[in-house]
Image (cartoon, rainbow, N blue to C red):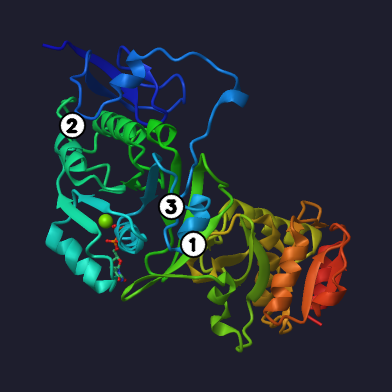
Amino acid sequence: MSKIKTVYVCRECGAESPKWMGRCNQCGEWNTFSEVQIAAKAPSLTTSVTSETSSFVRPMRLSDVTVSDVSRATTANGELDRVLGGGIVPGSLILIGGEPGIGKSTLVLQMALNLPQKRVLYVSGEESASQIKIRAERIRSQGLDNCMVVSDTSLDRIDEHIKNAQPDVVVIDSIQTVQTERVESIPGSVAQIRECTNILMHIAKSNNLPIILIGHINKDGQLAGPKVLEHMVDVVLQFEGDRNHMYRILRGIKNRFGSTNEIGIFEMLGDGLREVTNPSEMLLSQFDQQLSGVAISAAMEGVRPFLIEIQALASTAAYGTPQRSATGFDVRRLNMLLAVLEKRAGFKLAMKDVFLNVAGGLRVVDTAVDLAVAASILSSNTDITITQGICMAGEIGLSGEIRPVTRIEQRVSEAAKLGFQHIIIPKYSRSVSFSKSGIEVHQVMRLDQAFRLLFA
Ligand code: TYD
Ligand code: MG
């Protein structure tokens, strides 16, 4: 009989404490501790890594370490491969997080069905096998023979299924629904998620079997469950987007085998997710209409340039305190830009409601969109449209100066590729020759120079 030990674990950072605390002294969050019971000596699983712990391994020179050929399995999905860093690494534990209904199950099932010559075991704790079949038929994929499905939530049985089915890849949909008898708490609790991930990690490493976990996100946009979950897995990908928009972005949050700068863009269609290989197509919806309050920015997401439409609406405030709201853009940065426009460029915006929207349901963090944000607000405020065929990239400083941005050549060439005739960029950008790109480059130092070009 194993002894039961009780510890308290912080939901936010995973810190452990022998007694309950109101405030975590590691991350400072309040009321995040919950009781976790762990068997002091865990019963051994059928596929455990006992060999690893029992045999003595001597340290060796790094130069003497032999690398067994890491062959990444490509997923036959360019966008997913890009975010994974080239494909699935054997033995890796991959976590895909996202809000409910965003399309996680669709993405993973679509991948499972298209994996070339790989047997996939799809374990679902949320849907029955027939529901998965309906979904698979909806996305009209071929590989139904290579994909085994089982609807189960007991990790101890899942371990059994893995042993019997001998798959090349395992999918667990979702980590919040699985449970193990080793801990006595409900599925989805910190203790269960922690222990289940731990066991799955051992299964993955000892069998050199890649396991893909699907995880839910709570309302603060964090992966539900302890932060330790993110520490344990090799790759964390976040699937995001506005549920009312078709576009979805797969973002690398952590990747032990690749860059986290990469994003994958998908479009949710009636028959599954389509890869979006040309991200700029997202904005070209209203390309031929001349509207005030619309500016186009040459933005970067990770290492990919794309053009994005920024829409603003400035109107007289109906109530005493003007409202400022932004979708897809940081409201604090919007307030900062409004203050700069007011103080440094002399525009009276203090009594205006300002609404900002990034088209396509995208969230941009690139500061180079500042210039387009300022331009769209001004365009809406004055009701003057921005000259067509012009786009821009530039960060705005507190004194109204236009500051340099990264990867300017890529932005310019993306704009040129999409047929823009003019681009406004910061004066002090790294000097490069844009002559062959067939686009006129205007370099500006201050806001007013940019505005003269835009509203000429
Ligand atoms: P789902 O993959 O079930 O989301 P999650 O696993 O993240 O909760 O996707 C749910 C949504 O996607 C649902 O609202 C319907 C929509 N959808 C499509 O638009 N097209 C499709 O081909 C499929 C399978 C789903
Ligand atoms: Mg799902």
At x 44% / y 32%, what residue is drawn?
231
Q: Measured along the vertical axis of the image, is residue 110 above or below residue 441? A: above
Residue 90 placement: quadrant: top left
Residue placed farthest to the left in the image?
1
The reply to whether the residue tagged 2 has its Cβ within 8 angstroms of ligand 2 is no
Please tell me whether mark 1 or mark 3 is closer to you in this view: 3
Q: Is residue 90 left or right of residue 289?
A: left
Residue density around tag 1, few if under 14, some if 14–19, many if 20 or more, within 10 Å? many
Name the residue that disc number 2 marks.
180
- The amino acid at mark 2 is Thr
- Of callouts 3 and 2, which one flags the residue occurring earlier in the amino acid sequence? 3
At x 34% / y 41%, what residue is drawn?
209
Q: Secondary structure at mark 2?
A: loop
Q: Measured along the vertical axis of the image, is residue 244 above or below residue 150? A: below
Rendered location of residue 112, percent (x, y): 32, 58
Residue 110 placement: quadrant: bottom left
Name the residue that disc number 3 marks.
73
Q: Is residue 175 left or right of residue 393?
A: left
The tag on residue 79 is 1
The tag on residue 355 is none
Residue density around tag 2, few if under 14, some if 14–19, many if 20 or more, within 10 Å? many
Query: Can you see residue 129?
Result: yes
